[in-house]
Image: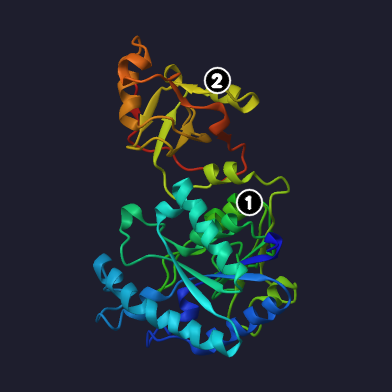
Amino acid sequence: MAENRNIVVKIGSALLANSDLLTPRFSFIQRLLEDVARLRNEGYNVILCSSGAVALGLKIVGETPESAGVSDKQAAAACGMPLLLNAYKQVGHEYGFEIAQVLLTLGDFEHHRRFLNTRNTVHRLLEAGVVPIVNENDTITTEEIRVGDNDRLAAKVAQMVGAKDFVILTCVDGLYDRNPDEPGAELVEEVRDVGEYMAATTGTSTLGTGGMTTKLKAANMAQEAGCMTYIANGEYERPLSAVLSGERRCTRCLPNPNPMSGMDGWIANRLQMAGSLEVPKDLADELAQDKRPIRREDIVAMDGDFTRGDVLHLYDSDGVERARGLSDFTSEEIRVMLVNPETPPEQLLGYKTKGEIIRANNLVMLENRHLLWDAPAGMTASS
């Protein structure tokens, strides 16, 4: 399987579900899978990241998009997923291919071993000629443990499989320089720095959980993996191939010409913040020139409850995020070391250790390549 032939496609709920009837839009699914078959015949592997399960199940549980709470949406996802997969399966058989369901949670992306296991499963499906249909497992996720939007989930899948093309199908032609309802709004056809347009992206659809903001965040993650992102309107014939061939206007978010390695990309591209550290600004500046380990004496403040191997966000004293890295300790172990600065780490923890909070080879400097996260409001001083 040639990885540079992988295409990841994210499909929004509004394209898949009738907003009034909350039933599958078979006309769209027909057009989509006809185009998937066309791309497969040209030698591409196509992975679909599909929303729609919650929307299709709402009527069954007697709720609407406006009235549904968390438990309602979990139940709706359980009811809607069979409807969604059955629609894909019926139409897929018309074009001679099988589909497979891959349900993921936040931990499948944030924990490296589970990330690799998931990648192996997706690769095996592609080798067998099966089209994976990926979605978050909304029946069991809560706000604390969920990805939250399928745009960023799809971007993580694109990173996972080394895709060169990532297509986000939505109900508008792409990114506009302001709210598209405003007079004079113009389509932005090419984007290098998504940060320049974040202020212009507000609002979500009735059925979906993400708006243009999450699409730009997803595009930024794909850019850093060396993947071209297309944000395009899915309400056309050949919704994929016409975009990829440049026949139809859309927004193209250009890949970084120097993409990160797989491991560095996994560390840098996060879906949730496990924890954070603050270090002096001069130290952060030094790290940008020459990486070295982060030790307990470097830490000014910390936030979060995390375990060994979680990714921590590193901030300077101005509150600017500068790096991300793997923690060698739990948050409790770090707190013990911080409040006992004169006692050797080995004596405090009861095992042999150098006391390096983040090792140099597990630290990734962001260097203005990523959308930066705001520092947590409750960061606690180390002393």
Of residue 79 and residue 125, the one placed in the foreground of this image is 125
Assign a secondary structure to mark 2. helix
In the image, what residue occupies the spot 62% across and 85% down? 34
Q: What element carries label 1?
A: loop
The residues bearing labels 1 and 2 have C-alpha atoms spaced at a distance of 29 Å
Between discs 1 and 2, the one toward the N terminus: 1
Q: Which mark is residue 225?
A: 1
Q: Position of residue 310 (x, y in %)?
A: 42, 39
Q: Nearer the viewer, residue 100 or 171?
A: 100
Across and down, in percent, residue 7 comes to 64, 67
Horizontal side of residue 201 vs 307, given as left or right? right
Placement of the C terminus among the 4 image quadrants: top left
Give, as a three-letter code, the residue at label 1: Ala
The residue lying at 62 percent from left, 36 percent from top is 367
Residue 215 seen in render: no
Q: How crowded is mark 1: few (under 14 residues within 10 Å), some or many (20 or more)?
A: many
Whole-percent x, y for residue 120 in the image:
54, 58
Please give the residue where the numbered disc 2 appears in the rendered image: 282
Q: Is residue 94 above or below residue 375?
A: below
User: Above or below — where is 323 with respect to 255?
Assistant: above
264 relative to 55 in the view: left or right: right
